[in-house]
Amino acid sequence: MSAAITTPPAAPTVSRLERLRQQLLSRADSLPTAAALVIFVLMLAYGEIAYGRIFQLSTVSNLFINNAHLIILAVGLTFVIISGGIDLSVGAIIALSSVCGVILANAGWNAGLVILVMILIGSTIGLVSGVLIQYFDVQPFIATLAMMFLGRGLASMLSTVPVRLDEASGILLLGTKIKLIDGPKVNDLVITPGVLIALLVVAAAFIILHRTRTGRTVYAIGGSEHSASLMGLAVVRTKLFIYVASGTLAGIAAVVYTARLGSAQNITGIGWELDAIAAAVIGGTLLTGGFGYVLGAVVGALVLGLMNVLITRDGSIPPEATTIITGGILLIFVLLQRAVISRQRE
Amino acid sequence: MSTDATSRTSMLRTLLHRPYFWGLIAIALLLAVNSLKDPSYLAIGYNANTGSLVGNVIDILRAAAPIAMISVGMCLVIATAGIDLSVGSLMAVAGAVSMELLASAGGSAGAALAALGLALLLGAVLGAVNAVLISVVGLQPFISTLVMMLAGRGLAKVITGGQNTAASNETFRWIANGYVLGLPVVFLLAVLIVIAVGLLVRRSALGLMIEAIGMDPRAARLAGVNRRGLLFAVYIASGALAAVAGIFASASVMTVDVSNTGYQLEMDAILAVVIGGTSLAGGKFNITGAAIGALLIATLDKTVVFLGISSSATPAFKAIVIIALCLLQSQRVRDLFRARRAKTAPVTSDAPKEAVAA
């Protein structure tokens, strides 16, 4: 009798394994994001063991403070990439917007007004990209490339030397450090309004992308734009929204960055569009579109930031090899995505 | 005489329908603007000491040579519906490896040849890595070459140890600064390479097959086109041409600036290709157009500096050129023009003929 009872569960064990496999496969989409999270934790652990002082409030605070702008950019890029497009203009938007902002602030403009102008510069450039892409069938790559050139060129016309913000400017308030937990020595949990803005942006983007109709449409466009428009989704409006949002977020990132640094230059933000794309991709957003997470982009940005911290701490890695490492990490994640996709096709 | 006139007008008409026609007009406009500022801008003098022609136009031709090299490579890549963002970084790698070799090997002609060979080989190998990622692994061209762009710039820095290596070698210097028949050697080499590549792809079936995989990879495969082999050929060609451009760029000053040599030149190359009438969607290409696009970019660069505008503001002017070209090429604007023409046509139906005859 006991044998009769013990034998039947043997079959369910197999099927349970099978079910687990099925579940894993159906969840394979989120594998890259999970991998990014695992790598982030591994990097933290490695840093703690090899160099020490990583699991510290001050290190974590600095990680967020120094990468707030990258998080904001990566969130914007996530929207664009999920829809199957690309935005190369964000780095140049930061240059134009921050140089403009500093010059206006130093000319005596009200800080709030300056911030509004800085953000609107981003929105305007995003809108132009969106119109070129949507109404004139220009490829996203080339339209945002044009905007990148335009932003960089205009910023260079305004100034080719670093411009410093007046000490008294209200914009700097956004970069002030607020102590939340007063730890021993310098080990404090510090936060800046800039970080809060970044977190707000993440929360808002999360709600829009994962909880609203607009968000679903973004995914649908990335899956197949043609099908999305046949289904009667608001493709035109959503695509414009995506590029305007990306530009606006770049404007916000410019505000946060300028507030932290207190100065701006025409060469600020060179290559940041690539960092932001890398962050989104590391976070599990598929470059072909149709798949991705907002929170993944945050993890991706933090992985890149932590990598810089570790390289600085290590000291033996030549700084010129940094870009090789970034490229390598990017390649690993893209290969991972590729493997997951081909797995699903089977 | 009448046949002569008609053949001339028909030639004009075909020229007008060439995709790079607007590029030529833009070059002429820029030169005209420069001549307005300085009437002797177009003047070409002769320097008896070096046996060379000197003048602003010669400078433009010299500056256009490296851009033309990467544009031709980019043109082939884009025809396969791909993109190669790594050309600028590969220029730096080629410059770095040749300068390092010359700095240690000395000034003999053999060393110059070795540097040339090594740079070309490295360019081709890195191009082949791109091709493996794209055709074997199946990654998108954009991301594969983006990785190569990041890694290549790092590789160049590692090769020189982060320094800007300088070297002296007369033979190597001659490539960029020498003259044959009064014209700069770089320009003549560039023209030769453009013609060679153009003949190779247009006189054989190669060009058609490249266009075929750019148009529809599936249909091309069903027709028996070897996609993988062609992609390898195209990306290796692009890498090797980028190495040539890197040699041109570093030989002219006999220094490699690892963070600035070829910096963002991939964007210039893409722009040159678009100006030349090659669609970024792939499936067709125009080598002559890409070369003219490169010439336009060099003219634009020189004009901005000549007019006394900061050279870092050049991108804004390039942006205006890109936007104008994209608008001219877009269906919506074309329809607008066509609609207007259709509206005016019945009233002045003879006008076009008269215009042509005149």
Image (cartoon, coloured by chain):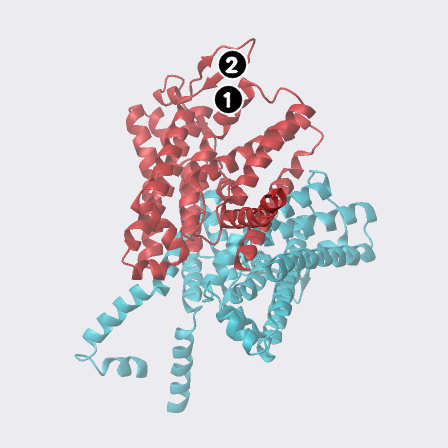
Chain colours: A red, B cyan
Query: Residue A272: image x %, image y %?
Result: 50, 39
**Front-most of residues A241 and B345:** A241
Query: Count of labels shown?
Result: 2
Answer left or right for A207 relative to B34.
Answer: left
Residue A61's disc number: 1
Looking at the rendered structure, the kind of residue marked 2 is Asp
Is residue A295 in view? yes
Q: Quadrant of the N terminus of chain A?
A: top right
Q: CA distance from mark 2 to mark 1?
A: 8 Å
Asked which quadrant contains residue A121, the reply is top left
Disc 1 is placed on an element classified as helix
- Write down the quadrant of residue A9 in the picture: top right
Q: Are marks 2 and 1 in contact (CB under 8 Å)?
A: yes
Image x and y of residue A212, in percent: 31, 43
Q: Helix or strand or loop: what does disc 2 sit on?
A: loop
Q: Residue at x 30, y 46 (%)?
A: A213
Give the residue at the far top of this rendering: A184
Q: Amino acid at mark 1?
A: Ser
**First along the sequence among labels 2 and 1:** 1
Q: Residues within 10 Å of mark 1 (few under 14, many from 20)?
A: many
Query: Label 2 belongs to which residue?
Result: A188
Against B234, residue A276 (above or below) is above
Q: Position of residue B220 (x, y in %)?
A: 54, 74
Q: Same chain for labels 2 and 1? Say yes or no.
A: yes
In the displayed image of the protein, which residue is found farthest to the left?
B347
Residue B97 is labelled as none
Does residue B307 show up?
no
Disc 1: which chain?
A
**Residue under the image location 28 percent in, 53 percent down:** A234
